[in-house]
Image (spheres, rainbow, N blue to C red):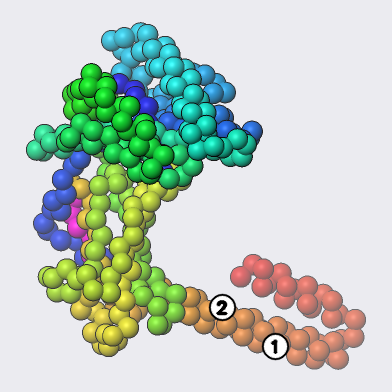
Amino acid sequence: KSGLPNLVCIVVLLHKSFITVIHSLRYFYSASSGLPDVPSYMSAGFLDDVQISYCDSRNNRNIPKQDWMNNVSSDNSHYWEEETLTCLAKQETLKENIEIAKLRLNQTGGVHVYQHIYGCDWDNETGQVKGFAQIGYDGEDFIALDLNTSLWIAAKPEAVLTKHKWDKNKYALQYEKFYFLKVCVEWLKKYERSGRRSLMKTVLPSVSLLQKTSSSPVSCLATGFYPNKAEIFSRKGEKQIHKGVETGEILPNNDGTFQMSVHIDLSSVGPEDWSKYECVFQLSGVNSIIHRLEKTRILTNESNTSIVIIAVVAALAVLGLIAVIGFIVYKKKNGELVNFFLFFCILIVEL
């Protein structure tokens, strides 16, 4: 349940990509001071990086962010009321913690943020479960729970006092371990069952090859895919390459889909050998998508600039022709110049 701590030529292969499906449940909590334009407390729940709940100090109500989350409350009509009570209780706890942190660090005014994130991961193929809890303050790690040793790890000297205090509470540590490895996973599975149809949808990406200049690395961008269980890499022949390759993180798009890219440095490779390299995108449960690095398939700023120059030159040539013809007509029929140019302007707009 909720807990609270601290954002082209396409070739399709016949083989499936094998990417382990790991489901995750995350809760993010944040308390702040000195920020009048934002709520002093905010919390949100995420299942597989999809937001499922939200609460803040302005609405003081925990609300579902997905329609299918209402199915979770079908066997408990008071579910969201209970979630709201949890939100209110956590709000007071975090506000107290931020004041304690300010006092311990000898801080008075200014902007300060206390963050808590915790959750669990579940591999539905192996059954492996992992849990974690981390706390941050003013954008830096403060303390984290090590479930293997059932001890808190201080990330900075100011957190040592908190570590010793929490390590002494053996009952709380036992409950934390039970929660993350049992309770959290049960809620994760329940949420996953409720939203399976929506969460398991598959949306294929648009894949493009991009290059700023002829000497820049070639970027292979895949955008618009769902879910975010994906990989992208470069290979030569059947061998994946790592030298001169930089792979970016999976990033969210505004429409709920995701994007990721891989950047390939081909400065030491002759142009005639570029086509030996490929960009491979793999999305869980679907066939791999491959782009061969062919020069004619790569979109560049230089090519766009050339197109613009050609278009401008062509436009100027047309206007020059119009001016010459217009002048001739004007010489032959004085007074009809305006109508002549009006005709050509209309013609150009219609084209």
Q: What type is the residue that disc 2 sits on?
A: Val
Which of the 4 image quarters holds residue 246? bottom left
Residue 118 in picture, x, y percent from top left? 32, 33
Residue span colored magenta: 286-290
Q: On the picture, is 32 further left or further right than 320?
A: left
Q: What type is the residue that disc 1 sits on?
A: Leu
- What residue would you read off at disc 1? 321
Mark on residue 23?
none
Is 55 inside the magenta-drawn segment?
no
- Compare residues 55 and 139 and report the one nearer the observer: 139
Residue 121 lies, with reference to residue 233, above or below; the image says: above
Which of the 4 image quarters holds residue 86? top left
- What residue would you read off at disc 2? 308
Mark 2 closeness class: few <14, some 14–19, many ≥20 residues within 10 Å: few
Residue 104 in picture, x, y percent from top left? 48, 34
Identify the residue at the far right of this view.
335
Is 288 inside the magenta-drawn segment?
yes
